[in-house]
Image: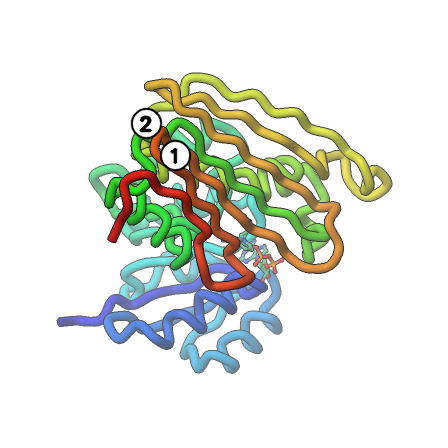
């Protein structure tokens, strides 16, 4: 099988994770790298042994030897680069959050539809403990689901642009709850969302951002199940990412980063 030739657009935190992951993927090779400054692009390309580096993402889109791009740039650039990549006929994998607005997101989906594959890189639906929790549900362990909860909390973003709402598009909800909302939707079997309520507050970082740094978001789904997502940039001491899921025959809990078990109560048994 021919390898998929990939261009990485973005050379920061998340693109380093993508580059590391690509080392494990035999069916793909990294052929081009891009960062906002040529020096950073060169350093990134040298580190990951990528033959071409540029500070202009359009030069990646112009290349015939690029089949797909993986985009890991500040959020305000997602829309422009996805639409340009689709026009250039490149398949796209995009980091979260999708877009600043629903209209932008819709335009990105439409630009890719029929022309190229468009992958939204939601990570936590692939976390082994959360995948195991989903399998427990599929084995009938906790019956009919009526509530899924997820929380992601840490001490705040590492990059300055995330604190700037013009570039990030928002605060902790845009940055973190996008994971939780995607998790609840996936966990509950992708039902349509019927309502969203988010209580947002800026508790600690008002001098640094206009965005909320603390939020509780409640999402109602068709069929009546509820998702509850807690997001915080105010928890020093490391990252906390946990789920709780409830059904009419039991419940299960998982902590992504600590311990290795899923405490579960099941009336019917499983596995
Ligand atoms: N899935 C996750 O858990 C996760 C984690 C972290 C970040 N992210 C997402 O990844 C994206 C990048 O975040 P990050 O933490 O890597 O940020 P970062 O600041 O570490 O890196 C951003 C990179 O984008 C590059 N860049 C900026 N403007 C550019 C332009 N015009 N053209 C080309 N490159 C440009 C910069 O040079 C830099 O290398 C964001 O959308 C963020 O939400 C996702």
Which quadrant of the frame does ligand 1 lie within? bottom right
Is 31 left or right of 210, judged from the image as shown?
left
| Any part of residue 110 in sight | no
Q: Nearer the viewer, residue 220 or 17?
A: 220
- In this rendering, the count of numbered labels is 2
Q: Residue furthest front?
A: 267
State the separation of the CA atoms marked 2 and 1.
6 Å
Up-down: is 263 above or below 199? below
Is 190 left or right of 48, judged from the image as shown?
left
Residue 108: x and y in percent read 38, 36
Q: Residues within 10 Å of mark 2 (few under 14, many from 20)?
A: some
Considering the image in quadrants, where does the N terminus appear? bottom left
Q: What colouring style does the render use?
A: rainbow
Up-down: is 22 above or below 194? below
Residue 189: x and y in percent read 30, 34
Residue depicted at 80% across the width and 36% down the height: 203
Query: Image quadrant of residue 252?
Result: top left
Is 108 left or right of 74, judged from the image as shown?
left
Q: Are marks 2 and 1 in contact (CB under 8 Å)?
A: yes
Residue beneath disc 1:
185
Residue 232: x and y in percent read 67, 42
SS class, disc 2:
loop
Residue depicted at 44% across the width and 54% down the height: 262
Residue 135: x and y in percent read 29, 49
Q: Residue furthest left?
A: 1
| Any part of residue 82 in sight | yes
Residue beneath disc 2:
191
Residue depicted at 58% across the width and 38% down the height: 174
Q: Residue furthest right?
A: 207
Q: Residues within 10 Å of mark 1 (few under 14, many from 20)?
A: many
SS class, disc 1:
helix
Is 213 left or right of 16, judged from the image as shown?
right
């Amino acid at each position: 099988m021919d390898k998929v030739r990939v261009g990485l657009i973005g050379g920061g935190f998340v693109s380093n994770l993508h580059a590391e992951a690509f080392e494990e993927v035999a069916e793909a090779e990294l052929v081009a790298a891009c960062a906002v400054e040529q020096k950073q692009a060169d350093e990134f390309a040298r580190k990951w042994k990528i033959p071409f580096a540029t500070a202009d993402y359009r030069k990646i889109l112009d290349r015939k030897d690029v089949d797909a791009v993986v985009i890991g740039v500040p959020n305000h650039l997602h829309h422009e680069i996805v639409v340009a990549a689709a026009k250039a006929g490149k398949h796209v994998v995009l980091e979260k959050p999708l877009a600043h607005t629903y209209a932008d997101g819709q335009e990105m989906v439409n630009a890719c539809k029929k022309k190229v594959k468009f992958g939204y890189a939601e990570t936590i639906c692939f976390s082994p403990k959360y995948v195991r929790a989903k399998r427990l549900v599929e084995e009938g362990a906790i019956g009919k689901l009526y509530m899924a909860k997820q929380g992601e909390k840490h001490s705040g973003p590492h990059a300055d642009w995330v604190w700037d709402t013009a570039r990030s598009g928002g605060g902790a909800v845009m940055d973190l709850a996008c994971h939780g909302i995607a998790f609840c939707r996936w966990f509950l079997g992708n039902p349509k969302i019927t309502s969203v309520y988010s209580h947002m507050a800026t508790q600690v970082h008002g001098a640094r951002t206009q965005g909320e740094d603390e939020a509780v978001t409640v999402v109602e789904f068709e069929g009546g199940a509820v998702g509850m997502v807690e997001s915080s940039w105010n928890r020093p001491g490391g990252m906390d990412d946990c789920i709780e899921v409830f059904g009419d025959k039991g419940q299960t809990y998982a902590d992504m980063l600590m311990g290795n078990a899923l405490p579960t109560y099941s009336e019917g048994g499983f596995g």
